[in-house]
Amino acid sequence: MFASLQGEGTRLGEKQVFVRFGGCNLQCDYCDEPETIPLGSGELRSLRDIQRSIEALVRDSGAASVSWTGGEPLIQKSFLRSALPWARAAGLSNYMETNGTHPAALRELATHCDTIAMDVKLPSATGRELWSVHREFLSVAPEKTFVKVILTASSSGSEWRKVVDLVADVSPDVPLILQPVTPTPAAAGIPPETALHFLSMARERLRDARLIPQWHPVWGLP
């Protein structure tokens, strides 16, 4: 848990308290927090202990929002059933960062979320076809959701077209964020001209498509 600036998406630059969950049901080749992938990773902490930490971080940083991130936070929906309403009652907004593959959990919790930062995971990065579950997930609360897609050198035009069609079919008002990968040994960066071509494709069908790199590495922040 820590306070920092949001470095991605539609709330770029906002002060937030980050609560990072251990455990994820996916294993993307560009993951920037691979130590959180194994189920059971991290340390066990009680709700009250986490509440006290959030309160202290809010006092020190002036943040008004909590980013529930991971790993994949929706795996731990029983904890979030209590944590999200508490944060709201404390005057904080809830920013849910998720891989977009747990629609049943989101249906239970969406009423307590203010912003849902949903990743759409491309098959070239995960080795899995997740289109149908992503579509179901986005349909739960599109008015609160923006979609983020990590683009790598392996991202193809055909799978990008599926992303645009998926978002447009649910709602053309959902913001779509193209995020060029911060290169890793397992994931090379997308050529700029390809990213710009994908942006142009998205703007043919969507009202809000943006190209926003990840800013944490630029700022030198966690």
Image: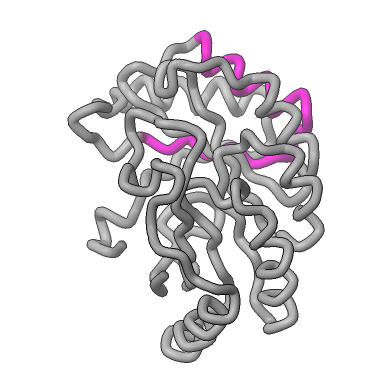
The residue shown at (71%, 69%) is 82
Q: Is 84 in front, or is 158?
A: 84
Q: Is residue 150 left or right of residue 54?
A: left
Q: Position of residue 6 (x, y in %)?
A: 45, 62
In which quarter of the view is residue 196 placed? top left
Q: Is residue 191 left or right of residue 166?
A: left
The residue shown at (60%, 21%) is 130
Q: Is 21 in front, or is 152?
A: 21
The residue shown at (58%, 78%) is 64
Q: Is residue 159 magenta?
A: yes
Is 38 located above or below residue 195 in the figure?
Answer: below
| Circle count | 0
The stretch in magenta equals: 158-180
Q: Is residue 109 magenta?
A: no
Q: Quadrant of the N terminus?
A: bottom left
Is 4 located above or below residue 77 in the figure?
Answer: below
Q: Position of residue 184 (x, y in %)?
A: 22, 35
Q: Residue furthest top?
A: 158
In which quarter of the view is residue 98 placed? top right
The residue shown at (69%, 46%) is 145
Q: Residue furthest left?
A: 185
Q: Position of residue 190 (x, y in %)?
A: 31, 25
